[in-house]
Amino acid sequence: MPTVQAWTGRETRALRQALRMSIRDFAENLGVSERTVSKWEAGRDAVQPRPEMQAALDTVLSRAGDGAGDRFVAATSRTDLVDSRFGARYQVQSHKFIPAYTGASAAAKLAAQDAFHPRPHEWLEVSIAGVPHAEGTCTAHLFACGVVVLHLSQELHFSTLASLAAWRYASYEQDLPWAADQVARLLSPTRSTDHAAPEYVLSMYVLQEPAWSGAELETALRLMSLPSVLVNRRAHPFPEPVGDDVERRLLAQGFDQPSIQPFGVHGLSVGYASWAGMAYHALSPEQALVIDDLVSCEVDVQMLWAYCRHIQRQVEDGQDPAMPREFGWRFLRAAHSRLTTARARETSQHCMMREAALSTSGLPERLTQAQTALRETAALSGRVNT
C-alpha cells in the first residue's frame, strides 16, 4: 500500500476519487463536514489538513482495497507528470487586505489598549496589533479616522497558476467570515455599534521564486493580477482550476487586458495591477521596491476605500453623511492630494506603483464623491445654524 508523507488537498481529492466516494460520504467517513473536505480539495497543494486529520487519512488509505490503492497511485502519478510539464514549483507570498469601518470613537478606544502600538505614518495616526491566524500572519492596522485594515500574509507553493487562482477564490469564502469575527472581537470592549462588517478581500502576490522567465514571466504576473480567467467560477461548491491546456496556451501566446496596468521598471522589476489586485516580482532585489512599500500603499488605499464606502452607504440610505469634523471633507481633500501628488524624494518606481494601485482601484473618483457629499452636508449645517 502506498504512503503519503504529507497530505494536501490534492492527495485528499485523489484518495476520495480512488475510493469512488462522494464528498458527503468521504466527510462522514473522516468525521468532518462536507465544507471541510471541499476546502481541502479546492486548496490543492496549498492546504494541509491538521495533524489528527493527516493520521485519519493515513488510516483510510491503509484500509483501501487493492483496486482503490492502484487508482490512488495512478492518480497521484498522473498529477506529478502534469505538474512536471510546467517546470519547477514556484513560491509566492500572498498578501490579503480586508478593511472594515469601525468609527472614529471606537478606533480611539481600541488604540488606547495595550494590544495596539503606534506605527509611524506620514499623515495619519495609526496603531497596529497582531491578530491570530492558523495559516499565516495577520496584522490589524487601526486608523484614527475609524477604519481597521487586516493584512494577512501567507507563504504558498504551487505548480500551476490555475491552482493559485482556485485557492484564492476558495480561501475568500473563509476569509470574510473570519475577518468579521476578528473585527467583532476587537470591538467587543468598546461596545461599538457604528461599524460595518468587511465587504471584500483584495489580494497582492509577491513572486519570490519564479518558475518562468522572459515573456512567460511577464504573462504569469499578468495572470496573477487578474486570475479569474484561470478558474471555472460555476463549479460547485468552489471554483475549480481550468484545464492544464488553457494555462499552457495562455503562457505560450501571452495574456493582456486593457484593465491591467504595468508598474515595473525594465531590468529591475515586473509589476501589474488590476481591479482584482496586484502582482510583483523583483528582478533586482537591491534596487526594486521592497514588500513594505507595496503593503503600505495598499493598506492606505484600502483604508480610504472603506472610509469612502461608509460615506456612500449613508448617502444611499437617504442620510446626510455625518463624520467627525477632523475627518471631514478637508481630510479627504488632503488624502486625495497626498496620494495623487509625487513626493520630492519619491522614486519613479514608487510613483508608478501608487498610480497603478489608485487607478485600478477607482479610489480617486470615490474620494471626490465622498468629499462632495461631506461638503454639501457641512454647507447645509451652516445654513441651518444661521
Image: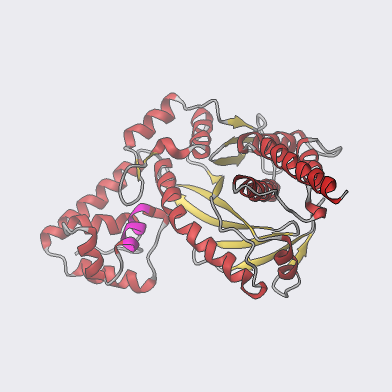
198 vs 236, nearest the viewer: 198
Q: Position of residue 174 (x, y in %)?
A: 45, 58
187 vs 13, nearest the viewer: 187
Left or right: 69 in relation to 357:
left
- Which residue does the image show at 31% across and 45% down from the upper left? 235
- Which residue does the image show at 22% across and 69% down from the upper left? 29
Q: Position of residue 261 (x, y in %)?
A: 60, 30
Q: How is the image coloured?
A: secondary structure
Left or right: 329 in relation to 260:
right
The segment highlighted magenta reads 35-42
Q: Position of residue 119 (x, y in %)?
A: 77, 61
Location of the N terminus (image quadrant): bottom left
Q: Number of marks in the image?
A: 0
- Which residue does the image show at 56% across and 47% down from the upper left? 202
Q: Position of residue 46 (x, y in %)?
A: 42, 55
Query: Quarter of the image holding residue 98?
Result: bottom right
Q: Is residue 40 magenta?
A: yes
Q: Is residue 292 above or below residue 119?
A: above
108 vs 310, nearest the viewer: 310
Q: Is residue 37 magenta?
A: yes
Prevailing SS of the magenta stretch: helix
Left or right: 62 in relation to 259:
left
Q: Is residue 218 above or below residue 292?
A: above
Left or right: 347 in relation to 219:
right
Q: Is residue 108 above or below residue 309?
A: below
21 vs 323, nearest the viewer: 323
